[in-house]
Image (spheres, helix red, strand yellow):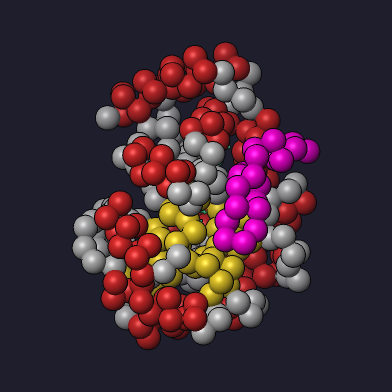
């Protein structure tokens, strides 16, 4: 079993977590909708992740919907003290599996209660408010109307910590003027580096940055350059992509997603892969080529 403590640790809310965590989105059915093909395999992935030292799991009640959280509860409840489950709100699913914005105070309150019930928690560790002003990615606009109701739910004791997702740097600044923000979750990986400046700013302020699609998401990363570097190191391209993120900044926490035990093991082993300085520089060309 890989020693994921080698990934290092970072404080997320009030817990020190291993920087290599796990993203649970792939545990729902195709298109993140409905039940998984193999529920037993989904339970096994979660149990092995935690047995291997993962103490940061990312989820949402709109995965399935409800399905992923119910699988997490079945696999891991009663939860160990050190496990941080981060969820996100701000969307709901249409009957056709569409991702629809859900930002009214009533929808946000319902989403918090759905997460509490399906995860079987009295209080949610961290809730990310996922902004969806544009379907394609972060877009400027005030987040005050959406964040204020979540801050109120925090005051009521239902939410311990708040994070933001799919946001611009102006929205992060606005969010921090409304309430304490412990993490930011945006699209970022070796080939998609729009948040380079944001990451460095958050690192200076000790705020966790949690890239989603670390492995490329629905279109997994593919680059002959990345493959060449990986084979030179005796590693896989996905392991190099994760190791690159671990070295990129100390506040980066990883939540690679997988429904496969073999991929989970491969991803967790990236904790022990340390990339030399010249490899880090060489990998910049993957981003340049993607741009
Ligand atoms: N805030 C947001 O808006 C947002 C958006 C998307 C995701 N997220 C979060 O981020 C987490 C990660 O996102 P993600 O799962 O979509 O993307 P990801 O981590 O970039 O990659 C997952 C994809 O890569 C495959 N994969 C995983 N490990 C692999 C390996 N070692 N070799 C080859 N393929 C591998 C997975 O398929 P297999 O199942 O076959 O391994 C899956 O297709 C999610 O679980 C979710 O919690 C957040």
- The one of 104 and 183 positioned closer to us in this rendering: 183
**Residue 174 in sight from this viewpoint:** yes
Choose between 41 and 56: the one closer to the eye: 56
Question: Could you say which quadrant of the image residue 271 lies in?
Answer: top right
Q: Residue at x 21, y 58 (%)?
A: 140
**For this rendering, which residue is in front, 261 or 270?**
270
Total number of numbered discs in the rendering: 0
Q: Quadrant of the N terminus?
A: top right
- Residue toward you, 274 or 46: 274
Look at the image and give the residue range highlighted in magenta. 1-21
Residue 269 in sight here: no
Does residue 27 sit above or below 129 in this rendering?
A: above
Q: Which residue is painted at 37% across and 86% down in the image? A: 106
Please state if 53 lies on the left or on the right of 100 as rendered.
Answer: right
Residue 192's quadrant in the figure?
Answer: top left
Is residue 279 magenta-colored? no
Residue 7 placed where, x, y %? Answer: 64, 38
- Name the residue located 35 percent from the left edge and 28 percent from the top edge: 287
Work out whether 231 lies above or below 255.
Answer: above
Q: Residue at x 34, y 39 (%)?
A: 197
Place of residue 256 in the rendered image (x, y in percent of width and height, measured from the top left): 55, 46
x and y percentages locating residue 191 in the rendered image: 37, 32
Q: Is-magenta flag for residue 7?
A: yes
Quick one: quadrant of the C terminus? top left
Quadrant hosting residue 233: top right
Instruction: Specify whether 176 is left or right of 41.
Output: left
């Amino acid at each position: 079993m890989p020693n994921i403590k080698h990934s290092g640790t970072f404080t997320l809310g009030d817990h020190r977590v291993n920087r290599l965590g796990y993203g649970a989105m792939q545990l729902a059915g195709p298109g993140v909708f409905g039940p998984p093909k193999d529920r037993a395999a989904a339970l096994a992935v979660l149990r092995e992740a935690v047995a291997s030292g993962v103490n940061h799991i990312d989820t949402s009640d709109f995965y399935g919907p409800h399905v992923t959280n119910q699988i997490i509860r079945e696999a891991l409840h009663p939860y160990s003290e050190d496990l941080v489950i981060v969820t996100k709100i701000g969307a709901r699913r249409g009957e056709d599996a569409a991702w629809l914005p859900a930002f009214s105070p009533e929808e946000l309150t319902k989403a918090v209660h759905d997460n509490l019930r399906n995860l079987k928690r009295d209080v949610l560790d961290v809730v990310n408010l996922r902004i969806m002003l544009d379907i394609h990615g972060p877009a400027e606009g005030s987040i005050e109307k959406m964040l204020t109701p979540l801050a109120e739910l925090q005051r009521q004791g239902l939410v311990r910590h708040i994070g933001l997702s799919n946001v611009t740097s102006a929205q992060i600044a606005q969010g921090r003027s409304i309430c304490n923000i412990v993490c930011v979750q945006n699209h970022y990986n070796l080939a998609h580096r729009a948040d380079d400046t944001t990451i460095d700013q958050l690192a200076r302020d000790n705020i966790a940055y949690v890239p989603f699609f670390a492995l490329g998401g629905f279109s997994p990363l593919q680059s002959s350059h990345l493959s060449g570097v990986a084979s030179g190191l005796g590693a896989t391209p996905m392991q190099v992509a994760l190791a690159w993120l671990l070295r990129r900044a100390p506040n980066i926490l990883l939540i690679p997603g997988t429904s496969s035990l073999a991929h989970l093991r491969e991803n967790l082993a990236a904790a022990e892969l340390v990339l030399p300085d010249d490899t880090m520089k060489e990998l910049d060309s993957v981003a340049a080529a993607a741009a």
